[in-house]
Image: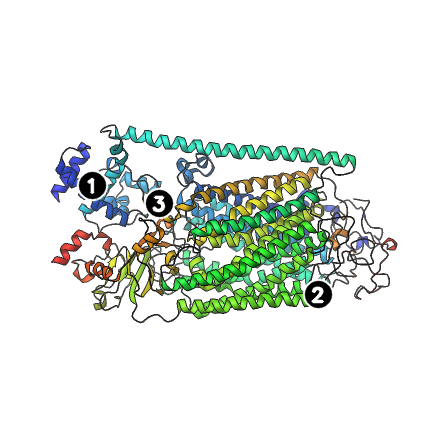
Amino acid sequence: MSTHTANTDGANHDAHDHGHHHETFISKYVFSMDHKMIAKQFLITGIIMGVIGMMMSLIFRLQLAYPDMKFPFLESVIGQWGKDGKLDPNFYLALITIHGTIMVFYVLTAGLSGTFSNLLIPLQVGARDMASPFMNMLSYWFFFLSSIVLLSSLFVDGGPASAGWTVYPPLSALPKAIPGSGTGMTLWLVAIILFIASALLGGINYITTVLNMRTKGMKMTRLPLTIWAFLITAVLGLLSFPVLLGAGLLLIFDRSFGTSFYLNEIVAELAGGIERVGGSPVLYQHLFWFLGHPEVYIILLPALGITSEVIATNSRKPIFGYRAMIGSILAIAFLSFIVWGHHMFITGMNPFLGSVFMLGTLIIAVPSAVKTFNYMATLWKGNLQLTPAMMFAIGLVSFFISGGLTGIYLGNAALDINLHDTYFVVAHFHLVMGSAAIFGMLSGIYHWYPRMFGRMMNNTLGYLHFWLTLVSAYCVFFPMHFMGLAGVPRRYYANTAYDQFNVFVDMNQFVTIAAIIGGAAQLLFLINFFGSIFRGKRAPQNPWHSNTLEWTAPVKHMHGNWPGDIPYVYRWPYDYSKPGSELDYIPQNIPDADQTDPLDEPKAVYLDLKNTTMPLVENKEA
Amino acid sequence: MKIVTSVLKSLVLVTALFSFSITAAFAQSAEEGEKLYNANCTSCHAINEKVVGPALKNVHTKRKEVWLLKWIKNSQALVKSGDADAIAIYKENNESVMTSFENLSDNQIKSIIAFIKKESEAPIQASIVPTGTSSANASTTEATEVSGTLKTSINWLVIVILALLIMVIVLVLDILAKVGDIQGKPVINWNGINAKLMLAFGSIGLVASAWEIWEHGKLTVLNQTPASTHGAEHDNMFMITLIITGIVFFITQGLLFWYAYKYKHSSKRRALFYPDNHKIELVWTVIPAIVLTILVVRGLKTWTDMTGEKDPNSRVIEVYGYQFAWNARYAGEDNLLGKHDFRQIGVMNALGVDTTDVKAQDDIVTNELHLGVGEPVLLKFRAKDVIHSAYLPHFRVQMNVVPGLPTQFGFTPSLTTAEMRQKLNNPKFDYVILCNKICGGAHYRMKMKVVVHAKEEFKQWLAQQPRLVNKSTPNVQATAQVETSTKTKLAN
């Protein structure tokens, strides 16, 4: 590899310069153990999965808007499932199932947390790489394998899993109940088990790296909020994914070995010739949602962490209430483990239990409100650089408010009775964890793209992408609330069997057109993303004038991240517009005038940046 | 029976309206067939479109009647016997097994076929074309298809134009950006434009939200009188939540986009270094906590009122769900449901009711749910195969229907169907139970009509329904029962 040293203090260079010279194409781009390369692998796989998931949603949106119309192109795209241009009802269910699975796990868990935890944890805490680069590589390849298995299920007899992304048994357990519960379901379970392996390998690594490998001076109270979010996310994943693994294994037993963990009073004829007695379908739901609810925060917290960082940097202001932000992440994480029952208010569970889950659920609104108010206080009297990343972050806050408020309806058991499984729920979670998390992810991509690829993305395309996406996302999901409030159930192939839903024909078409526009807008992003890898402007050392450590590492990627010593950290990451300093930012690696020990808190307010020896703004090498 | 058969046969052969007597017989048979069709077939079939099963249009000309009888009664037996047609259909429909209808008599199936025949020919009767059935049909469908494809192509055209427009805009902006790079000063002040767009989006968005709540809110619970007594309390809770969250929504979204506009970048200004203020943070932790306490307390009260102790005099009705239909079983005079045993579920006993149980003797099985206004009911839910969910939106009632796990929900209907029709100004309106938990291909058609009668009317209706004990066979799929035969049985 190139042995350029960006910094002048490259004395201890060889301390980490081991084995760099034997790099082949395979070890650099395929089986790479470098966290930055693995981050890019996660991101690009995530984007490909995201495109597939989104195209699926466009197909079923067409069906929902025009249930009586024929789309001859469908037959060429999905073959037997779109005979004569009509989408098959069973395949509709397969599409929504795989759309949900892809978006929740493959895009918003692996694509978001996998990408940014990998990229930012070592760079922002000041580490050469992850604690175990090999496990990190395994984490990606398990994820890759899992994606392949899931996608291969699209081509098996009977189609892919079709029981909804939550795959509730008995529908998912009885191959006779729906064609997708045959081979497709088996592949789904295998894919998820591989995915869990990937998530656990990644999670252990993230936690270990954050706790053990911080550079000198990087106290827990000096961690950027991104790292706090990734850390807590990894803890959530580590505690909840194994439960899903258990749930999945038991489901495999029920499907393949004739057990009855989730089945009761099912006649032999339906269940492969063996009568099933003694289990409970609701047991699966408890296990599933014990992961499922923390999973919502596994998706959302990294997005919120990214937002905190992007908003503070681009407001040129410290994030308001740093400790309150950490406190609310911890509170949300804790509460997320004791509220899973709000997905199950109407499964017939004891109403008293429902009350407990309802109480816990509504309490989550308090730390969420604190986070929202803190974001807004950060914007207040800021000096906002409306970069694409910043705008996506503001969009996230808007979705977080809109979707969060409808959570107060759904968390209320008394209202959930009428809203459960309607389009109100679809609207709610697509805003609060769909759109919000995607916006967090896009914000992160625009912000750290120079860090990942050493080039800048095109801003104009970014602005257009943002506005089209924001408007279309609201046009798609906001009207759905009203369908839900009128009782339109989700997961319906068509509403044609119910005269009372005819009033929503126009709305459904409007939503579909908005979705198509939103989908087309993502083409702008794809062009921008892949085009800029080759044609983007070369990135400067610190394009956003940010304080965090990743911007002190050379633009051109290298093993070990920093050519010389790892920089020490002297301050928290949010010294933006600090009175007394000449520039409106002070990177974490800059000591105050009289600060010698990194562990001391900087005392002097005034700092003469010009006399510091550390690289600050421009790096000529770049 | 022979007469009906011969009449049907002659109808198939003649295909026109020849004599009065034949028309009458045909009409009667088709009328009976319509009821049976709606009760047994619609969840998986439609006349003109494929649902889970194939479209039934002209099925009477495609297959022989004998074959149809065999297939409908037990399609799997026919497949196993090696019948080529049967195997082909089975394969064509992704090997999903059609429910067996051995409980239907030959005559009943024939009347269903008569109904399908009538429906298949419906457009011809309108245009009075006696012959050339298939060609006439083809032309009408072709016409709708043409207009359909026309619409689609217009839509696609619009999309293509939009895409081109965006490309042009992007190109222009890109050129302007390059010009700016050359001049050393950006041509377009994006920061200012984006800030203004933020303000525009915020204000238009909030106005649009308000408009939508006003306009589309009318179609929702906000504007529908609930049809149950607890519904009022639910709607009340909903309104309180809507008002509180609405206020928060407008204030926070308004401020967010206002700040995004107001504090846009200026090189003349420096941001305020303001990392903390414990007092403010305390305030905005405590205020949401108080508001949520109000919502929680109020919500818990509503929840316990809805799910708490039931009126002990509630009428017990079992709602039974299976792929893809519902049945209701009334507990009868003793208000006790007879035992059930899933092992007895079969073609002849769809609900698996233990008919030897004394309590089951007076049970009544129907395929519509009839209720009396003001009369508390306790619905007990049971499922055969997978999880379903009984959703009665007008009553603000929903409960999962889980195989092997009994669930229940008690409520009191407060508006009759007739009253609701008047309120909605829709004479065709009917209450409905719909399935709201993904349960298979025809999930979206799994429904049961719900009728709320005035008290007396309900008693009369109930008295007319056959008891299980009255039946000669343990055939509890009451779907097979038609009112006419019911009346004769009651008279006996």
Q: Picture quarter containing residue B53?
A: top left
- The relative height of residue A594 versus residue A478 in the rendered view (above or below) is below
- Callout 2: SS: loop
Q: Chain of mark 2?
A: B
In front: B337, or A563?
Answer: B337
Check if mark 1 and mark 2 are on a common chain: yes
Circle 1: is it few (<14), some (14-19), or many (20+) Cα within 10 Å? few
Return the mark for residue B66.
1
Q: Position of residue B101 (x, y in %)?
A: 25, 50
- Residue type indicated by callout 1: Val
In front: B313, or B240?
Answer: B240
Q: Chain of mark 1?
A: B
Residue at horizontal 56 percent and vertical 54 percent from the top: A402
Residue B352 visible in rendering: no
- Residue type indicated by callout 3: Val
Nearer the N terminus, badge 1 or badge 2?
A: 1
Q: Quadrant of the C terminus of chain A?
A: top right
Q: Residue furthest right?
A: A611
Q: Picture quarter containing residue A373?
A: bottom right
Nearer the N terminus, badge 3 or badge 1?
A: 3
> Which callout, 1 or 2, points to the residue nearer the camera?
2
- Residue type indicated by callout 2: Asn
Q: How is the image coloured?
A: rainbow
Return the mark for residue B52.
3
Q: CA distance from mark 3 to mark 2?
A: 62 Å
Residue at horizontal 71 percent and vertical 53 percent from the top: A315
Apparent side of residue A502 relative to residue B352 in the rendered image (left or right): right
